[in-house]
Amino acid sequence: MNKYNWVITRAQISAGDIDGAIHRLDPAVIPDEEVYGLAGAVRLRVEGLTRLADLIADPTARQFFQALHERWPWAGYFLRLHPITADSPLEQIMDTSLFMALLLCRVDHLTYVETPQGVGLCYDADQFSRHLADLQIYAAQLAELVDFPPTFISQRDALIARTVDRFFAAGQTVNPPI
């Protein structure tokens, strides 16, 4: 794992090893100028993950990502985000999917159903929106701590919102509602 590419292992997830996953990007211990340079620079991957549903449906992984958010709530600031389409490169789709997994793992009563086209999700949209707002607030607070210009904060906030909107739009394109 380096500063820009995180590979969270299945062993870390099973052991709940949050410190092994996030210790290198703790804004309390890295210089402000480095925090600035890491905006949108971190690529998150989970070892052996082939489908988003495998992550959000696994109780151990859900617990791990819930704890990850509690210890490292700045995902909206650090992670690479892309407003994807159904034709986006796989790496961008994975970047966005793992960001979405961070959000979806925090939603109670998440239900997924296998469909001929893929996976359908049911969740509390209000709770999801609150968690999304939390991520945006934490990203903005971090940017304020290191004294970024307000335009930078608003641009990052808009990118987070576009990324989420496009993720769902791409999903509707690939898996049209029945």
Image: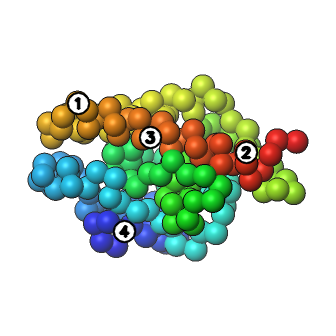
Which quadrant of the structure image shows residue 38? Answer: bottom left
Q: Is residue 46 above or below residue 100?
A: below
- CB of mark 4 within 8 Å of CB of mark 2? no
Q: Which residue is mark 2?
A: 172
Q: Which is more foreground, mark 4 or mark 2?
A: 2
Asked which colour scheme the image uses, the reply is: rainbow
- For the N terminus, the quadrant is bottom left
| Residue 101 visible from this viewpoint | no
Left or right: where 158 falls relative to 55: left
Q: Residue at x 73, y 38 (%)?
A: 122
Q: Quadrant of residue 20?
A: bottom left
Q: Which residue is mark 4?
A: 5
Q: Is residue 10 above or below residue 162?
A: below
Choose the circle earlier in sequence order: 1 or 3.
1
Query: Disc 2 versus disc 3: distance between alpha carbons?
Result: 19 Å
Residue named by callout 3:
160
Compare residues 150 and 71 and report the one nearer the observer.
150
* Rendered location of residue 148, percent (x, y): 18, 38
Earlier along the polypeptide chain: callout 3 or callout 4? 4
Q: Is residue 58 left or right of residue 15?
A: right
Residue at (35% x, 60% y) in the render:
42
Please tell me whether mark 3 or mark 4 is closer to you in this view: 3
Measured in 3D between alpha carbons, the distance from the residue under mark 3 to the one under mark 4, in whole angstroms, is 19 Å
Kindly identify which residue carries mark 1: 150
Q: Mark yes or no: residue 84 visible.
A: yes
Mark sitting on residue 48: none
